[in-house]
Image (cartoon, rainbow, N blue to C red):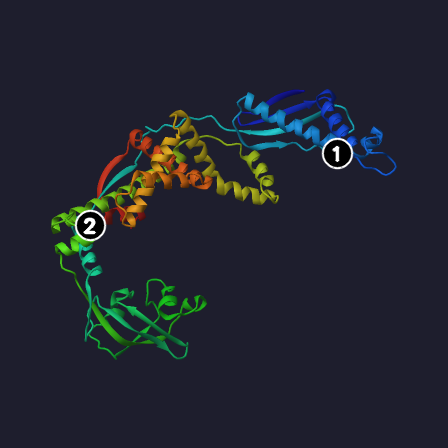
Amino acid sequence: MNITREQVDALNAVVTVAITKEDYKPNVDKVLGDYRKNASIPGFRKGAVPMSLIQKQYGKAVLVDEVNKLLQTSLNDYLVEEKLDILGNPLPKITEDFNWDADDYAFEFELGLAPEFTVDLAAKNKLVKYNITADEKMLDEQVERIQKQYGKLVSKEKSEEGDDIKGTFTNEEKGINNNVTITPSIFKTKTAGKKFIGKKVGDVVTVSTKNLFDDDHKLMEFLKVGHDDVHGLEIDVDFTIEEINTTEKAELNQELFDKLFGEGVVTSVEQLKEKIKEDAEQQFATQADQKFLNDVTEFLIENTKFDLPAEFLKKWIQTAGENPLSAEQAEEEYNKSEKGLRYQLIEGKIITDNNLQITFDDLKAYTAEVIKKQMAQFGQMNPTDEDVEGIVSRVLSNKDEVKRLSEQVMSEKMLNLFKENVKAKEKEVTYEAFIKEMYGE
């Protein structure tokens, strides 16, 4: 057997695998011999069937099968030995007049090679690393939210802004009759909301459905109107008020503090705000990290320049799935996946260059932290090491979970690497300002 490679260009090559009769004949003879031992053909004793008959009946199929096995093994071994970093899989060059009756064969395969490039994490950029703080306005809002959440529902005679108003939307023509609880602030315009202010139980308020909400789909929830009817719906609906309630805020006292955080953990409003600030900023840090990771990823894709064997990859995409694709479909698929492929290569390069590895200890430690956070959400603040280790063992016995958690661990390692090496501008912002910058509002 002889394997040679012709380098078409930096990203494409053709490998030729030459197989002689001496390479495959021993295996073919062995398989046919086994067939002969077990063949049951009328007129012959078992094991006494002439080899010529076995050859005639099974010879070609066995030959093709054994040559293909040998071809696959030798090609894979060659790629490993030569340390060829290929994209996709080798594509066989189809020969229409291929002759299986010959003794020696030559098979050609097209290869798409991964490009060589460098990743400069220290490159000049306009990236921002946000430090999100919980400002006094947010803390006051959160304290008020807690007071309302743990407050007491009080019935009222006349409605005001912020009250919960229970009633029924009706429209006889459209068959609407839906009981809901609303607050005047849910409507898109202040004009609609004001119609509900100062009303009493038994009063009927009429509003138009046109532009009633910021999203017409909300009509499905509040009026129980079908999806096909909500777009452009312009009718009047009546709302008959049945109850008016407000929430009497809970007092900021030790009883409430203990209910929220456990006995004696928080003893004042100042400490309550500190606790809220600490918890909020931990969550904000996670969001800021994710944005930084996304921004660095986009920057690297945009600024790490290299070519891909595009034509090869399009041909490979045509045959890679369960169903063959047309050239046009493969082109479309390639265009959709090119960005992801580029980042896979960039990520692989970063991992190799910086020797980023995931050990089993890394995986166990990360999983334990995830489990502790989840348990804390359900009130188990101090689980025993034994309990945590038991859950970790069960989680890591699941291959899908191991894969998912490994990706998260590597993502964390990449983030830490970026924080250390990417020179980004640091900016302290409130959460409200962060959202505005994130979505360009």
Instruction: Bin the neighbour count of mark 2 within 10 Å (Cα to Cα): few under 14, some 14-19, many 20 and up.
Output: few
**Residue 10 versus residue 198 in the image, above or below:** above
Q: Is residue 427 left or right of residue 356?
A: left
**Res 118 → quadrant:** top left
Name the residue tied to disc 1. 61
Amino acid, disc 1 = Ala
State how far apart marks 1 and 2 are (Cα): 74 Å
In depth, the one of 64 and 257 nearer the eye is 257
On the picture, is 117 further left or further right than 437?
A: right
From the viewer's side, name the closer residue of 59 and 98: 59
Quadrant of the snapshot with the N terminus: top right
Residue 382 on image: x %, y %:
26, 43
**Residue nearer the viewer, 18 or 5:** 18
Determine which quarter of the picture holds residue 122: top left
Q: Secondary structure at mark 1?
A: helix
> Eyeballing the image, is 245 above or below 322?
below
Pick whichever of labels 1 and 2 is earlier in the sequence.
1
Check disc 2 and report the residue beneath it: 261
